[in-house]
Amino acid sequence: MKKIYLLLCGCFTLLFLQACSAQSSLILIESSVEITSDSTKLGSYTITTGDDKGKKLVPTALFYQFKIANTGFKTLGDHGDKGISIKLEPKPSLIQATKQTIGFNIFNPDDYKQSGVGHGQSISTMIPPNSEGDYVLFFELGVSEENPDIPLLVSPQEQLIKLQDEAYQAYLIILIDGKEVKRIDLSELTTK
């Protein structure tokens, strides 16, 4: 009985240390946020109806970039759903800024319905030991020209600047296999 107890304690200790090591070995080493209309970052939409059929429209987006390092001794993540992913959890001031800028909470995917635009990401699902992974999250804010396919027009520059000023009022959440392993308060970063 004592051997089984010791074996179970050892297994739980290893599992706990493994979970803790994933959290402590992932560090955010770089972050940036911008409002951009760069087609190389965002792509474009092709108008499918009307006089401007075939014309390309580049959306404007709130564009986050993160570089995360694995300082540990083992590869973290895996392929597909078991890999590393990230998400943003906005603070109330950032949600309010998005509502004032474009009329809805861009961090809630359901709110994008009927807007004609969307959101996306690019992630590294695995980070080997002593390596870095690049992560991008973007949230489209509209297009600059009226058209029948995309009803959401981008807000004036003054409102976009206010939104960008609030962009770090969020938590960056790092997940492995769908489980949160690290939470970083972006508002505490000294370089923006």
Image: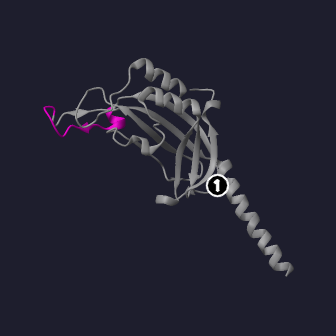
> The C terminus is located in which quarter?
top right
Q: Is residue 126 above or below residue 38?
A: below
> The N terminus is located in which quarter?
bottom right
Q: Is residue 45 above or below residue 160?
A: below
Residue type at mark 1 is Phe
Range drawn in magenta: 39-52
Residue 79 appears in view: no
Which residue corresponds to the image point at 37% horizontal and 36% vertical from the top-left? 41
Q: Which percent across, then down, holds residue 27?
A: 62, 43
Q: Is residue 187 above or below residue 127?
A: above
Q: Is residue 36 left or right of residue 58?
A: right
Which residue corresponds to the image point at 47% horizontal and 30% vertical from the top-left? 99
Considering every residue shown, the one lying at the far bottom of the view is: 1
Q: Which residue is the site of mark 1? A: 73
Asked if residue 180 is among those painted magenta in the image, a careful observer would answer: no
Asked if residue 51 is among those painted magenta in the image, a careful observer would answer: yes
Q: Please, which colouring scheme is shown?
A: one colour
Q: Which percent across, then down, holds residue 20?
A: 70, 54
Question: Helix or strand or loop: what does disc 1 sit on?
Answer: loop
Which residue corresponds to the image point at 75% horizontal and 66% vertical from the top-left? 12
Considering every residue shown, the one lying at the far top of the view is: 158
Q: Is residue 68 left or right of residue 1?
A: left
The residue nearer to you, when weighing 54 against 8, is: 54
Q: Which percent across, then down, holds residue 153?
A: 32, 28
Residue 105 appears in view: yes
Which residue corresponds to the image point at 29% horizontal and 32% vertical from the top-left? 58
Q: Is residue 102 left or right of residue 46?
A: right
Label 1: how many Cα within 10 Å (few below 14, some 14–19, many 20+): few
Q: Image quadrant of residue 89?
A: top right
Q: Which percent across, then down, holds residue 88?
A: 54, 41
